[in-house]
Amino acid sequence: MVMVVCGSCELKMVCIKTGADISFQNGHHVYPSDRYECPKCKSVVNISNSSPLFDPNPEPPEEFDVWMS
């Protein structure tokens, strides 16, 4: 089990979504991730520890999905 701690508040962050995306190269390379939120300051982070998947037809990002160029 992983414990994610907010860098500002030093509180344990709560997992609010599994199956969030971190996308590279216009959405063609996708890292599956989990989204965590701080209960105090509401900071949000996506954390992944897997290899990317190839998506030949990427969809537009959902709110808080991470798209990197």
Image (cartoon, rainbow, N blue to C red):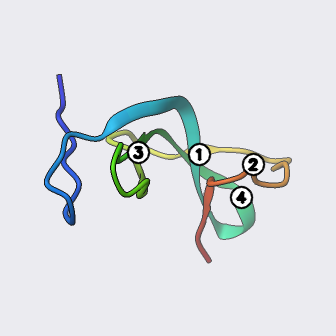
Say the numbered circle drawn on residue 62: 2
Distance of label 4 from label 3 (alpha carbons):
23 Å
Closer to the camera in the image, 30 or 4: 4
Query: In the image, what residue type sits under mark 4?
Result: Gly
Looking at the image, is mark 1 or mark 4 earlier in the sequence?
1
| Location of mark 3 (residue) | 37
Front of the two marks 3 and 2:
3
Q: Dot 3: what SS? A: strand
Closer to the camera in the image, 24 or 38: 38
Q: Quadrant of the N terminus?
A: top left
| Location of mark 1 (residue) | 21
The residue drawn where x is 18% and y is 48% is 5
Front of the two marks 1 and 2:
2
Distance of label 1 from label 4 (alpha carbons):
9 Å
Report x, y in % for residue 39. Answer: 35, 43
Query: In the image, what residue type sits under mark 2?
Result: Glu
Report x, y in % for residue 56. Answer: 80, 47
Looking at the image, is mark 1 or mark 2 earlier in the sequence?
1
Say the numbered circle drawn on residue 27: 4
* In contact (CB < 8 Å): disc 1 and disc 2: yes
Distance of label 3 from label 2 (alpha carbons):
16 Å
Query: In the image, what residue type sits under mark 1?
Result: Asp
Front of the two marks 4 and 2:
2
